[in-house]
Image: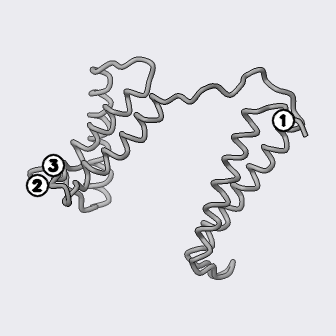
């Protein structure tokens, strides 16, 4: 068997692995039936659909000719920036009480998230990043605090 399109093959493999992992994780929840779904029904169904989609993509990659693009080295900078941004947002939102790090709140957390995530791009413009962070902070405040009435620490002094 020859892999003719390596990018599609490995993308399908990733989809299949993630789908099977979600389906495996859903086993511990009650499934229920189609008429009365339990908490594990939807994750199991979505996991199996994602695994099936991955299998279809992998099979097509074995049959379809290569597009000429090969898998290159990992893009470490975007990977580290995006993962770090999400981790820092979690720390900013909830703090780390065990280490004595207080919560910064939703608004400052969004600024941290946006500024660090903008480092993933090819170019970084501080003005654009701050404008984006301001827009996201205002929209998040309106959606989560005002409309949905979720209880967040909005500012560190609240």
Q: Which mark is residue 155?
A: 3
Marks 2/3 in contact by CB < 8 Å: the verdict is: yes
Secondary structure at numbered mark 3? loop
Q: Quadrant of residue 123?
A: top left
- Return the x and y of residue 141 as percentages of the image width and height: 26, 48
Query: Closer to the N terminus: mark 3 or mark 1?
Result: 1
Calculate the distance from the C-alpha at mark 3 to the C-alpha at mark 1.
53 Å
Q: Mark 1 highlights which residue?
A: 3
Residue occupying the point 28% across, 48% down: 142
Q: Nearer the viewer, mark 1 or mark 2?
A: 1
Marks 1/2 in contact by CB < 8 Å: the verdict is: no
Secondary structure at numbered mark 2? loop
Nearest the eye: 54 or 10: 10
Residue occupying the point 66% across, 57% down: 19
Q: Mark 2 highlights which residue?
A: 158
Residue occupying the point 61% across, 78% down: 37
Q: Nearer the viewer, mark 3 or mark 1?
A: 1
Calculate the distance from the C-alpha at mark 2 to the C-alpha at mark 3.
5 Å
Q: Quadrant of residue 127?
A: top left
Q: Quadrant of residue 11?
A: top right
Quarter of the figure with the C terminus: bottom left
Residue occupying the point 15% across, 49% down: 155
Nearest the eye: 151 or 10: 10
**What's the colour scheme?**
one colour
- Return the x and y of residue 3 as percentages of the image width and height: 84, 35
Residue 1 is left or right of residue 86, and the answer is right
Query: Closer to the N terminus: mark 1 or mark 2?
Result: 1
Residue 112 is left or right of residue 52, and the answer is left
């Amino acid at each position: 068997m020859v892999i003719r399109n390596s990018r599609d093959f490995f993308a399908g493999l990733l989809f299949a692995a993630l789908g099977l992992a979600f389906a495996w994780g859903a086993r511990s929840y009650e499934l229920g039936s189609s008429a009365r779904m339990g908490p594990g029904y939807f994750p199991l169904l979505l996991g199996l659909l994602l695994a099936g989609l991955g299998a279809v993509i992998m099979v097509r990659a074995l049959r379809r000719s290569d597009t000429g693009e090969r898998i290159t080295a990992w893009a470490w900078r975007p990977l580290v920036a995006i993962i770090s941004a999400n981790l820092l947002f979690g720390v900013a939102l909830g703090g780390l009480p065990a280490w004595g790090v207080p919560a910064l709140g939703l608004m400052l957390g969004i600024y941290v998230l946006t500024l660090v995530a903008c480092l993933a791009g090819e170019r970084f413009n501080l003005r654009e990043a701050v404008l984006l962070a301001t827009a996201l902070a205002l929209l998040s405040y309106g959606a989560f605090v005002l409309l949905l009435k979720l209880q967040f620490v909005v500012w560190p002094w609240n």
